[in-house]
Amino acid sequence: MSIEENIRRYILENYLFTEDQSELDNKDSLLKKGIMDSTGIMELILYLEEEFKIKIDDDEIIPENMDSVNSILNFLNSKHVT
Amino acid sequence: MITSNARTIRPQRLLREGMIASAQRHPDKEAVVVEGKAYSYAELLESSLRLAAVLKQRGILQGDRVAIYMNNTWPCVVSIYATLLVGGVFMAINPQTKVEKLKFMLEDSEAKILITESLLEKYFLPAIQNIELLKGMIISGDLASSSVHESIENEDFNHVLQNSRPLQEPVEIIPNDLAALIYTSGSTGFPKGVMLSHQSMVFAAWSLIEYQRLSESDRILLVLPITFDYGLYQLLMAMKLGATLIIERSFVFPVEIYKRIEEQKVTVFPAVPMIYALMISSHKKKKLCFPTVTRITNTAAALSAEYIPYLHEIFPNALIYKMYGLTECKRVSYLEPELIDEKPTSVGRAIPGTEVFLLSAEGEPVTPGDTGILHVRGPHIMMGYWKNPEKSKEMLRPGKFPGEKVLCTGDLFRMDEDGLLYFVGRSDDIIKTRGEKVSPVEVENTLVGIVGIKEAAVIGVNNNIHGQVIKAFVSLDNGVELNDRKIKKVCSENIENFMVPSEVIIMKELPKTDNGKLDKKTLAQV
């Protein structure tokens, strides 16, 4: 499973509760679309930290890094997750 | 001869008058700053008058309901004041509301116009099907779907605003008229519309301003939804005072908010325990400090006494307010911030200009230290529930004087020798989670509506941060395969996120009492 598939599956299953891939576009703003709330973002961070063995600083939890599948992928890339 | 002029002191009777007066006093001052973009009082008044003119043209008369189903945005603020200027009743609907409930609210309230935003089209497009009384929609942003109902006229928010002329004069109404209808969860499973008059909302806003010691120079941060009455009053208070409201969509990205507090020199920070919990956990890793903030407030669920020392560190110059309230009267009590270290578990005394007392189930006064049902007396209490005289009668009891009503909250409290209040619990099975009242029946109805679920029981479980969280127990029809995730998904499609059970337990059979009723006492021990 690619990192992209992994992230998409996690968000679809845990926030949209679906397997329907069409429900999530990689560009969708998770915040504006109402997919992410305060508890959700904390769960996402924990998931990313465990799944990819990385440490995410509070300062890194910003929209540029976390607000869409694309931004999460870019962020993981910058953390050298492959 | 004495003529009326601008110097004459004009009393504030209607909710909109505070904003109008502020706009006249300092038109160029920042009224709101939405995600970093500032709008002056003159802009707010002008835009609201323009939208009010549109509403009038579309047939909104005194007392007509305008549904506002939106996130924390500039169009949302304008829509609230436009409705008030045209003499209408605004009905702010939580943007988490899903299709069925939205439809119920639109039907029940007989709203004539829905103002909303394209991001929510997934929910409102199906909800407006076959709603006869809804005459029009004003939508902010572009719709993705092309299949908009032809029967309902829909217009673009910015377009109508640009192409209309401001309303000449606000439509005349009096303080006894309805200002807002706020829906809250009802024990029967259907939400009830709390009717609030201008009189009661103006009174409540001034009472809050008084005890929070707010002034024109304050800069209040809003990260809570405007559709939540705690959020709504931040707007109402700021505009009355001629202060500035810093509006953010949510607290999802705390670091952004921290930057905003510094950059905008925020002085008042209203929040709920979950937000404070997140801040404290950040603070433990890396010190946070916001010296510009001079008051922080908490309601929705109890603020744990353990948080207080950390909050003193994060907000070294702030008074900390613990408060208690319910939509039916906006707010009940607050603890004087000077008492926070001495009485950390109390929610204080009645807000200025009001009275509270505890009565036993039989209606007798209780002695200090004993538990009783909280009753509230004052001009802030609701007029009743919309089209629901029976429920209104249950909550509004005959008061001290002929015709006077007192609010029987159904909340159990204890009062100490000094007259300070302590929350004990609910006298019914209503769950209080994240500051919202949730009726177990409503969640149970959603659960048994899922194909394959035979029975469902929902209870509230005490939780340090949310007050309570929702736990569901279900049994399934023979041969059905369903898991908790799938069940939560269906719930989240039908009810607001805060109503979705945080835990779903699938059991072979739900425990029953001797007379065959679901045994929630046993379930509470599972």
Image (cartoon, grey):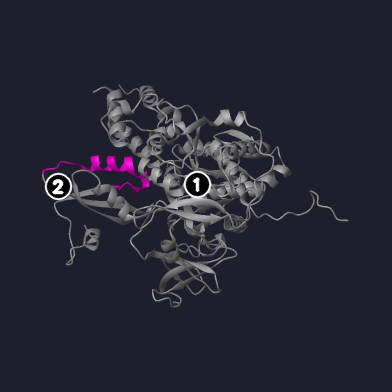
Residue B166 vertical position relative to residue B307 in the rendered view, above or below: above
The residue singled out by tag 1 in the image is: B91
Tell me: B325 left or right of B443: right
Tell me: B29 left or right of B199: right
Label 1 and label 2: CA atoms lie apart by 40 Å
Where residue B130 sits: x, y (%)?
39, 39
Query: Does residue B146 show up magenta in the picture?
Result: no
Tell me: B459 left or right of A37: left
- Badge 2 sits on which subunit? B
The answer to whether any part of residue B263 appears in the image is no
- In terms of sequence position, does the residue under pointer 1 or pointer 2 come before the other? 1
Q: Are marks 1 and 2 in contact (CB under 8 Å)?
A: no
- The amino acid on which the numbered mark 2 sits, given as a three-letter code, is Asp
Q: In the depicted view, which residue is nearer to us: A37 or B290? A: A37
Residue B24 vertical position relative to residue B522 in the rendered view, above or below: above
The answer to whether any part of residue B208 appears in the image is yes
Query: Does residue B485 show up magenta in the picture?
Result: yes
The residue singled out by tag 2 in the image is: B477
At mark 1, the secondary structure is: strand
Residue B190 vertical position relative to residue B146 in the rendered view, above or below: below
Tell me: B339 left or right of B411: right
What is the quadrant of residue A23 in the picture?
Answer: top left
Mark 2: give few (<14), some (14-19) or many (20+) Cα within 10 Å: few
Stretch in magenta:
B479-503
- The amino acid on which the numbered mark 1 sits, given as a three-letter code, is Met
At mark 2, the secondary structure is: loop
Q: In the depicted view, which residue is nearer to us: B467 or B184? A: B184
Quadrant position of the N terminus of chain A in the picture: top left
Where residue B31 sits: x, y (%)?
63, 40
Where residue B117 sits: x, y (%)?
48, 34
